[in-house]
């Protein structure tokens, strides 16, 4: 069988949610199925590390699909041309985009419908494109793969997709996320925060990620509980970050906040494992990968009551209303003031994270695609 795959989110040293899912799943499926041929369809020059095995043929198509007009050209012209040229039997698209111009069986991975619930987080043109095309993609799909029960329910509600057409394939933590020793934690804290314990946020600085309220909550926490705790924020600036900058400049404890920008994976593993607690309170997530990454390190979490996050965190975190700053701040205080609670959540974190496994997810997805 020839499986064509949309791999435009395989960006070297820039893997985020969709890119991470694509990388972890594809490296396992391609190596486990040498009898099948995989055609990787990139929209820009690729890094050789993404060519996981001899049964992968990389193809670069144009134009680079990073704008709605270019989305159309890429998926309605370049993709159907490639599917025909390489005689693909199926098309797997890990970012949910399909080609309405091709009759090949197509399997989208739709991670979320954030554009419906938080349209202010994208441009007007993107909003128009997504609202027009995603219902069509969902109906065009042979089957839909999604990453949480929340998103499955959302697809059924928003697009009236039959329950039996949607399969859940969870995200999972990379193997590098694991507990580390007390001495290793001290070494990391010495270099990062001058020996101070820290709360951690990992993710893009984007309005939907709720960074402004996180900063306000940390400022309130410091006023109520003078400690040496820091807040470490790891991630790239996305767009519409002026509000974050405004809140940051108004903080009394802004000197206690450390912005690292995007970090290499090895550093991310270590800094996550050395954290006292992950504070991850977006307004909306299709999954929430940093939650399971932290839990895999035995790090408890504070996360949101909204969308998929309670499903992912389970009993390994404190769940708060992300719109209420005092709830976030009070959860930080609870972590500091109740060591027995922290111990309980640390134990639960390892057990909860074990429910999410890339090997299992890859087997699930491959059985859907390869048995079509």
Image (tube, rainbow, N blue to C red):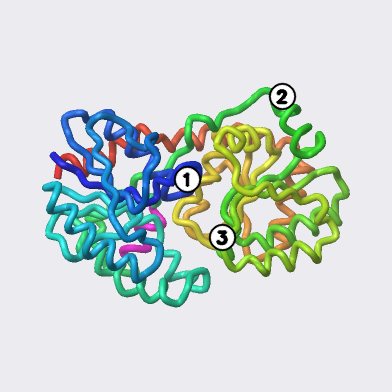
Residue tagged 1 = 15
In-front residue for pair 161/49: 49
Query: What residue is at 29 percent from the left and 70 percent from the top?
Result: 133
Query: What residue is at 76 percent from the left and 51 percent from the top?
Result: 257
- Image x and y of residue 132, in percent: 31, 74
Q: In the image, 261: left or right of 193?
A: left
- Image x and y of residue 263, in percent: 60, 42
Residue tagged 2 = 182
Q: In the image, 201: left or right of 290?
A: right
Q: Quadrant of residue 151?
A: bottom left
Count of numbered circles in the view: 3
Alpha carbon of mark 3 to alpha carbon of mark 2: how far?
Answer: 34 Å
Residue tagged 3 = 238
Q: Give the magenta range.
A: 149-156
Q: Residues at badges 3 and 2 in contact (C-beta under 8 Å)?
A: no
Alpha carbon of mark 1 to alpha carbon of mark 3: how far?
Answer: 14 Å
Eyeballing the image, is 305 above or below 16? below
Is residue 262 visible in the rendered image? The answer is yes
């Amino acid at each position: 069988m020839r499986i064509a795959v949309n791999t435009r989110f395989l960006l070297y040293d820039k893997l985020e949610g969709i890119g991470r899912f694509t990388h972890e799943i594809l490296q396992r499926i391609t190596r486990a199925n040498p009898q099948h041929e995989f055609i990787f369809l990139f929209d820009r020059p690729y890094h050789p590390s993404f060519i996981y095995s001899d049964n992968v043929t990389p193809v670069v198509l144009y134009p680079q699909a990073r704008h709605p007009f270019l989305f159309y050209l890429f998926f309605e012209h370049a993709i159907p041309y490639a599917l025909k040229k390489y005689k693909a039997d199926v098309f797997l698209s890990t970012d949910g985009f399909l080609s309405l111009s091709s009759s090949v069986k197509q399997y989208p991975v739709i991670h979320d419908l954030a554009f419906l619930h938080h349209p202010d987080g994208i441009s007007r043109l993107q909003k128009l494109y997504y609202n027009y095309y995603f219902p069509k993609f969902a109906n065009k799909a042979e089957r839909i793969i999604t990453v949480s029960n929340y998103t499955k329910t959302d697809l059924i509600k928003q697009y009236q997709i039959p329950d039996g057409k949607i399969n859940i394939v969870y995200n999972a933590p990379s193997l590098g996320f694991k507990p580390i020793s007390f001495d290793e934690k001290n070494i990391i804290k010495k270099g990062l925060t001058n020996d101070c314990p820290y709360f951690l946020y990992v993710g893009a600085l984007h309005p939907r990620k709720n960074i402004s309220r996180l900063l306000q909550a940390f400022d309130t926490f410091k006023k109520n509980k003078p400690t040496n705790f820091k807040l470490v924020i790891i991630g790239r600036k996305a767009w519409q970050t002026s509000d974050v900058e405004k809140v940051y400049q108004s903080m009394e404890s802004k000197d206690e906040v450390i912005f690292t920008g995007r970090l290499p994976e090895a550093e991310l593993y270590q800094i996550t494992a050395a954290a006292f607690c992950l504070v991850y309170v977006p307004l909306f997530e299709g999954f929430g990968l940093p939650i399971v990454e932290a839990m895999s390190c035995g790090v408890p979490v504070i996360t949101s009551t909204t969308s998929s996050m309670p499903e992912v965190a389970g009993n390994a975190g404190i769940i708060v209303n992300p719109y209420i700053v005092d709830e976030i701040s009070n959860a930080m205080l609870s972590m500091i003031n109740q060591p027995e609670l922290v111990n309980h959540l640390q134990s639960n974190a390892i057990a909860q994270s074990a429910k999410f496994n890339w090997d299992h997810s890859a087997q699930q997805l491959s059985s859907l695609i390869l048995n079509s």
